[in-house]
Amino acid sequence: MMKLCIIYVLQITYFMMCAIQPVSSTGSHRNGHLKPLGSHAAVKRPVKVLDGFPSPQEFYMDYVYSSVPVVFKDGARRSSAFSKWTDEYLMNLPESRETFVDVENKKVENRSLDGTTMSFEDFVKQYKKLDSYLVTDVPDFLGKDIVVPPPLLCEPVLKTVVSMVMWFSSGGTKSVIHNDDVENINCIFSGSKEFLFMNVTKYRNQIVFDHPEGSYMGTNVESVDFDKYPEFEDMEYYYASASAGDCIYIPYKWIHQVNSIDRNIAVNLWFEHRTDLTPTSDSCGTISPDTTLADIEIYEPPEQVDDILTKVILFMLQSQDGNEDNFIEFVNTLDDYQGMEWTNDALVAAKGFFKFADKDNDAQLTVQDVNLLKPVS
């Protein structure tokens, strides 16, 4: 009996040790666990720095098409905003009292919180005391103080600019880990910013946003939990520090996180990711190097149908030859639609849909098939 008791106690002890064992291998014993993002990264590659700007053609060929971030040293010094934008100048402009701007209520970005709206003048008066930062479309009355970066001084490129955004704080802001569906040139007029980049090509499948609706991660960037977010433990980062007077190019879809230091004012230009755009001296035309944000118009893409099924039905209604080959070719045009990539499995599914939707069995998808389709109850 005693022997059986000893065996029983040993078994219980063994299972308790097994249950406890995983705790010793959790993130708490791993370098960088619960510390700022990238603070203990084994690999942190410097982002390339250029003196000034390349031409539009060089910019697209060397950086946009190659998807490579780059810092343009002293690129923002060309704008009068670099020297003019003191607090006194900004708050004393007559338009600052009449212009209302969007303000985020925490310097450590939290996208679940609602923002605040106030006059630009009130923000400039208070921002040094606030745990908040301004992020808003560049006010119209300030656009004249910002010269368009030379890589964008090309007629077809300017037509792709979709947004111009101003960021303003007393420093200490920290963004979430995120990416953007557009290209981005960010110019800094006061303070400095630190950028951590994660190569979207290398980590496309490793990093899965837990907030896909906003293309961002919910992790606390000041204390990254490797148990919950193990993908960041052995990440290879690119690092860039951009000071007042510099601009930086952030490629389409590159995952990044940004920290701001000291009184901080920056403006970014978001422009469409276009693989069919090749700037040349002929296509760019002659645009004045003094062109400012006040001189350009925001590009508004044509309204798109957001629902893929609706697009398919439109294909069936409008197609002159809705055979299977043309339908599959149409499906291929939906590649990367809203971040989705069509795989071979998706194409097999598309062929299955073709057979299902071809209700009259004439090997064509037509308006007759649309009329025969009935909703599934």
Image (cartoon, rainbow, N blue to C red):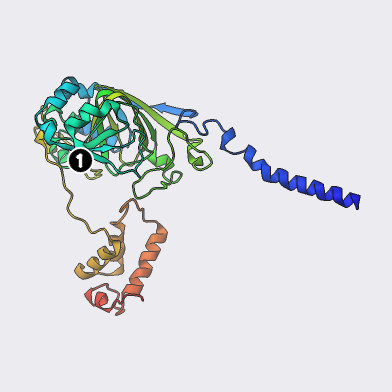
- Report if residue 80 is visible in the image: no
Q: Judge whether 349 appears above or below 61 on screen.
A: below
Give the x, y percent position of residue 42. 50, 29
Residue count near mark 1 (Cα–Cα under 10 Å), binned few <14, some 14–19, many ≥20: some
Residue type highlighted by circle 1? Ser
Q: Residue at x 24, y 44 (%)?
A: 274
> 94 or 302, which is in the foreground?
94
Question: Disc 1 designates what residue?
Answer: 163
- Quarter-wise, where is residue 167 in the image? top left
Q: Please state the total of marks drawn on the protein image.
A: 1
Residue 318 at what x, y percent from top left? 19, 68
| Pick the front one: 53 or 239 | 239
Left or right of 356? Residue 272 is left
Give residue 137's position: percent from left, percent from top: 19, 38
Rendering coords of residue 313 (x, y %): 25, 68
Give the quadrant of the C terminus.
bottom left
Task: Please indicate whether residue 51 sits to the left or right of residue 281 in the image.
Answer: right
* Quadrant position of residue 344: bottom left
Any part of residue 217 in sight:
yes
Between 250 and 173, the one nearer to me in the picture: 173
Indicate the secondary structure of the residue bearing disc 1: strand
Along the viewing direction, whichever of 124 and 287 lies nearer the viewer: 124
The residue at 16%/47% (across/down) is: 300
